[in-house]
């Protein structure tokens, strides 16, 4: 059984084909990073235009890579949200066109469900499972007791982890996207600056990163007024240590409290070396299984949408022909959807 999936929620145009839920047979990602770099972030209008230009070639490339045709597909999946509305619409309309023309069922997929399911390409899920979602727009702890069953037990009250990385990178005048740049610098520096950790209330699994961002701004500002200077490497290492400390500590606490079998790390920040190392260390001597996707499946791709879409397809989820983009699609609601 084959499912072809399209992802256009942000700045990568991606198409992937999955066989029997977990076997990746094609995975093509056309990144627009170069076009957004000079603006220091994703420009929605530019993103939409690029998706329109790239979608057909990306689709053809995926089919060629798999050695299959659209007729071989059993279903078409697409990211319907959350994300940039204009960007999402390109994928949604392309998927609708393909499904309609080829008489294939259409499945709408939640982008964050996709990020979580990226790990299932490596290893079968064992529930209950706790997902640490750390991406450009989301930071959440999600408890899963079964497939497509999502309970958000904690989330950020302000900035997402990836957003904090990108903002601090801008302060350090690093190019966009800043996450990988800070990660690279952090490895060369030492965590000599004591930045705050937002633990919040004792029993809370929520996060907060805006205070940390302000602390970085203040530290750099005060130092420059005194004519002192911190090495960017040390700022990066100290910032990263604070982020990683909070993320790994709260994940461990929740994983223990909910007695999960697996912890799944999801989203672009899952590519972070410091976080990968800290979590590996944290769960090393426990009987909790830690799943972290390979680097290319951490940031946006369609393989994750295909594998999540295949689960939704199996559960009977079908989108109607009036499927629209849903920029604010809720994860828990998405999981509770019945078949049409
Ligand atoms: P969302 O998934 O919430 O809709 P998004 O799709 O824009 O947001 P992703 O593509 O999942 O986000 O992740 C991109 C984010 O990951 C960016 O903020 C980027 O800086 C960050 N990121 C990527 N690699 C690393 C890294 N090695 N270390 C830290 N952050 C990273
Ligand atoms: Mg991206
Ligand atoms: Fe994403």
Image: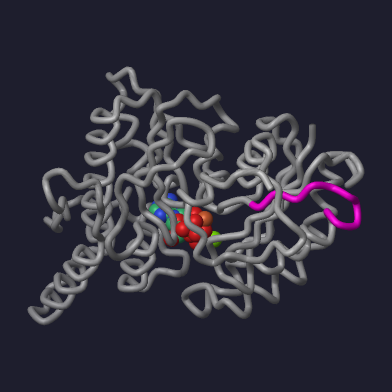
Q: Is residue 180 visible?
A: no
Q: Magenta stretch: give its range.
A: 99-108
State the quadrant of the N terminus.
top right
Residue 32 image position (x, y, % from top left): 63, 67
Residue 241 within the segment the image draws in magenta: no
Viewer-nearest residue: 271 or 112: 112
Question: In the drawing, does residue 312 fall left or right of residue 173?
Answer: right
Q: Residue furthest left?
A: 226
Viewer-nearest residue: 166 or 313: 313
Disc tally is 0
Q: Residue drawn at (71%, 48%), measured in percent from left and top? A: 318
Question: In the drawing, does residue 316 fall left or right of residue 159?
Answer: right
Question: In the drawing, does residue 273 fall left or right of residue 105?
Answer: left
Q: In the picture, residue 322 is in which quadrant?
A: bottom right
Q: Residue drawn at (47%, 68%), measured in percent from left and top? A: 176
Q: Is residue 95 visible?
A: yes
Q: Residue drawn at (55%, 53%), measured in percent from left and top? A: 111
Residue 95 image position (x, y, % from top left): 77, 58
Q: Residue drawn at (63%, 61%), measured in percent from left and top? A: 12
Viewer-nearest residue: 54 or 305: 305
Question: In the drawing, does residue 215 fall left or right of residue 248?
Answer: left
Residue 264 image position (x, y, % from top left): 43, 35
């Amino acid at each position: 059984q084959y499912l072809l999936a399209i992802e256009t929620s942000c700045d990568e145009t991606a198409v992937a084909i999955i066989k029997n839920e977990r076997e990746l047979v094609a995975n093509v990602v056309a990144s627009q990073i170069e076009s957004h770099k000079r603006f220091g972030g994703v420009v929605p209008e530019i993103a939409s235009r690029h998706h329109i230009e790239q979608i057909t070639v990306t689709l053809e490339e995926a089919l060629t890579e798999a050695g299959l045709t659209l007729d071989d597909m059993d279903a078409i999946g697409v990211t319907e949200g959350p994300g940039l509305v204009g960007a999402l619409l390109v994928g949604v309309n392309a998927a609708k066109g393909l499904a309609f023309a080829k008489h294939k069922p259409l499945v709408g997929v939640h982008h964050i469900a996709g990020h979580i399911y990226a790990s299932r390409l490596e290893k079968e899920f064992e529930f209950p499972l706790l997902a640490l979602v750390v991406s450009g727009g989301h930071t959440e702890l999600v408890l899963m007791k079964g497939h497509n069953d999502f309970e958000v037990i904690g989330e950020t009250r302000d900035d997402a982890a990836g957003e904090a990385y990108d903002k601090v990178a801008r302060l350090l005048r690093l190019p966009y996207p800043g996450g990988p740049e800070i990660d690279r610098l952090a490895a060369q520096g030492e965590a000599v600056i004591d930045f705050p950790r937002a633990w919040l209330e004792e029993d809370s699994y929520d996060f907060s990163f805006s205070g940390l961002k302000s602390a970085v701004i203040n530290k750099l500002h005060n130092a420059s007024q005194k004519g002192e200077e911190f090495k960017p490497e040390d700022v990066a290492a100290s910032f990263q240590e604070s982020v990683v400390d909070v993320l790994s500590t709260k994940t461990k606490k929740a994983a223990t409290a909910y007695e999960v079998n697996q912890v799944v790390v999801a989203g672009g920040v899952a590519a972070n070396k410091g976080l990968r190392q800290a979590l590996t260390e944290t769960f090393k001597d426990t009987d909790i299984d830690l799943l972290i996707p390979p680097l290319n499946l951490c940031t946006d791709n369609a393989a994750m949408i295909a594998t999540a879409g295949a689960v939704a397809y199996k559960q009977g989820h079908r989108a109607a022909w009036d499927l629209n983009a849903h920029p604010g699609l809720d994860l828990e609601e998405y999981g509770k959807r019945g078949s049409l």
